[in-house]
Amino acid sequence: MKRRDFLKGSLAATTGLFGLPTILSSTAAAKASANDKINIAQIGYGRYGQTDVRETIRHHDMCRFVAIADVDTKRGNIGKEWIENYYEREMGNSNYIDVKFYQDYREMIRRDDVDAVVISTPDHWHARQVVECAMLGKDIFVQKPAAVTHEHSRAISDTINRTGRIFQIGTQQRASDPWPQFKFVCELVRNGAIGKLKNVKVGLPTDPSGEDWPEEPVPDNLDYDMWLGYTPVAPYNERRVHPQDDFSRPGWLRIEEYCAGMITGWGSHHIDIAHWGMGTEYTGPIEIEGTAEFPESGLWTVHGPYDVRSKYANGVTMHVSNKHPNGIRFEGEDGWIFVSRGQARATADDPIGDDADDETLQASDPDILRTKIGPNDLHLYESPEIHKDWLQSVRSRRPGATNAELAHRSTSACILKQIAMHLERKLYWDPVNERFKNDDEANEMLSRPERMPYGIAHINI
């Protein structure tokens, strides 16, 4: 069994839903109206936080950033300055807004004038912050994946559904801006353009292993204990957290305590699209088996090369492997379609692979791609740019491209694959009760212990 220091814990230790209050605070009322700007607070200003701010703020006719929080004061103040400079340029007024900076986001999200929150933190923080913000009556945009564990992902969906908040996750491949090809292909597949769907092949990148870098002094500008959150105390090294001098790809993306690796990093995008084309957005696989190479030493612990196969109740099989081209290939009885981003990146240092093809659409027969979706055919949700879609939902109070349950199901499918990689045996999953059948060891891996005072079990509203 290849699983070096894989974190496990009992479900009882981390079942935050048992302790979450069902009554919202006095800030729960939706304050954004058609005539008011949506006041937004930003949590995290790192590699993706920059993107989330810039993609959201360009819709400033609908919203206004009023506050920003980051455990790293250097990054938080850079974000504050950038937002204020943007408004000065766009509004022609240097005094348009004074963006308040917080090192502890918990103080910020309790402001009565904050309507919505954008969460761009490391993956292990997503669940706590989403659940907490929803309980305080805030609408939420969060970067993918929903969480690092299945239980945290389920807690997000349950809390959003109970509180009625507007939720969106950063799955921009569902949006027609910038990549309309994904929706088009899913409509083709769902409308039978390749006949009965049989197999789906998903190709994702891999991450390299690292060295045993020594402990370093914690920078004065970083609240490292809070950055660690509910995860175990660990010696600080810049490669564990994020670069201090730039916004390049951080090391936490390669450590299992904070991120499951590429299986959720890119898998949250591609498996979401696979589910969309399969029509299985609200369920999950029933069988999963896989293998992967995990580093035997070094700071970085996420999987390397991998091969995972799963089966769904409708008979469709999904094969996820780093050996497939980066993208999604739908195979039916009458042909196949492959869809990808091509060589496009969401950020400059996205590891899409050097062999990425320029073509974003390919098919066994070019005529398949010329198929017209008729007025009586199935039409999937039409989303503009994903941040704009979220803002429109906040205004209208109607769900957007990816609700919390969709986000949970795609994240869960990735996490189940990660568990199968570690156990290297066939697992049988019940997608209704969301438990492995007759496998206590696998079920223990659905959750992890939580270090106080962090994690969803220790929320105090």
Image: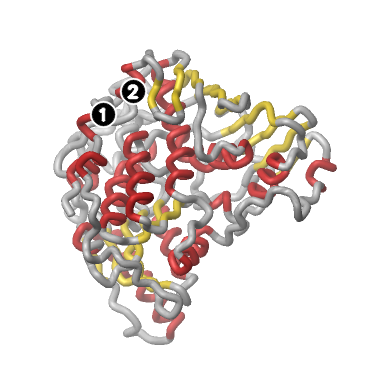
**Label 1: few (<14), some or many (≥20) within 10 Å?**
some
Q: Position of residue 385 (x, y in %)?
A: 55, 60
* Residue under pointer 1: 11
**Element type at marker 2?**
helix
- Tell me, yes or no, if residue 379 can be seen here: yes
Query: Where 146 sits versus 263, above or below?
Result: below
Query: Where 301 sits versus 78, above or below?
Result: above
Q: Position of residue 311 (x, y in %)?
A: 56, 23
Q: Position of residue 378 (x, y in %)?
A: 69, 48
Q: Where is residue 221 in the image (x, y as percent from the top left)?
A: 20, 56
**Quadrant of the image containing the N terminus:** top left
CB under 8 Å between discs 1 and 2: yes
Name the residue: 37% across, 60% down.
139
**Label 2: few (<14), some or many (≥20) within 10 Å?**
many
Query: Where 237 sits versus 46, above or below?
Result: above
Residue 443: which numbered mark, if any?
2
Observer-nearest of 12 and 52: 12
| Quarter occupied by residue 198 | top right
